[in-house]
Amino acid sequence: MQSKQSSQFMEVAIAKDSVILRLVVGVLFLLGGIALWYSKQAAILGILAASFAAAMLVFGFRLLLDFRPGLVIQATGLTLNGKLGYGGVVLWSDIIGFSLTRYGHDYQLIVNVRQPETYIARGSYIYRKLNSISDALFGSPIRINAGLLDYNRNDLLRVLNDFHMR
């Protein structure tokens, strides 16, 4: 696990091995989509699959090249890397609690906040829409894919709750 930790500060790195695995799966999905496209029997499905895979590969390569921490926990609150979900600072005074929710094959770390509409309204149009979707799906606009953090999800939940209680 790559993290820097003290009693008042902790950085959690992005899990590069998880990102690489997702990139390999994305390449395979892209190749499958291209094969479907050329088969002429499912050309539209192939185009959709290849387009989705290409977008996911761009996202993955951006993560692979991002050397900033995925999550910073400090005395004032949390700072989340925008490439992993909601990006920005969340003050402890705004946080109600944390939970882990399984979504597909990954776990999402949900940060439950007072006045979620404030966090939904932050960022560009696309980020506002994504935050709104996150709020509808998970009950909070702030969530981060725990599988993309280089830290055990249950231990991270325990650390976050400890910081929150202080």
Image (tube, rainbow, N blue to C red):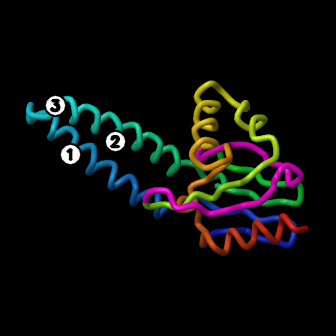
Which of these two is toward me, 148 or 40?
40
Say if residue 10 shows up in the picture: yes
Please determine whether, in this image, residue 74 is positioned above or below residue 128: below
Left/right placement of residue 72 relative to residue 150 reads right
* Tag 1: amino acid: Gly
Tell me residue 114's x, y (percent). Answer: 82, 46
Image quadrant in which you'd find residue 33: top left
Tell me residue 43's x, y (percent). Answer: 16, 31
Left/right placement of residue 91 relative to residue 3 reads right
Q: Is residue 112 magenta?
A: no
Which secondary structure, mark 2? helix
Which secondary structure, mark 1? helix
Left/right placement of residue 149 relative to residue 46 reads right
Q: For the point 70% across and 50% down, which residue is it?
A: 80
Image quadrant in which you'd find residue 22: bottom left
* Tag 2: amino acid: Ala
Q: For the point 62% across and 35% down, which residue is it?
A: 132
Residue identified by numbered label 1: 32
Q: CA distance from mark 2 to mark 1?
A: 10 Å
Crowding near pointer 1: few (<14 within 10 Å), some, many (20+)?
Answer: some
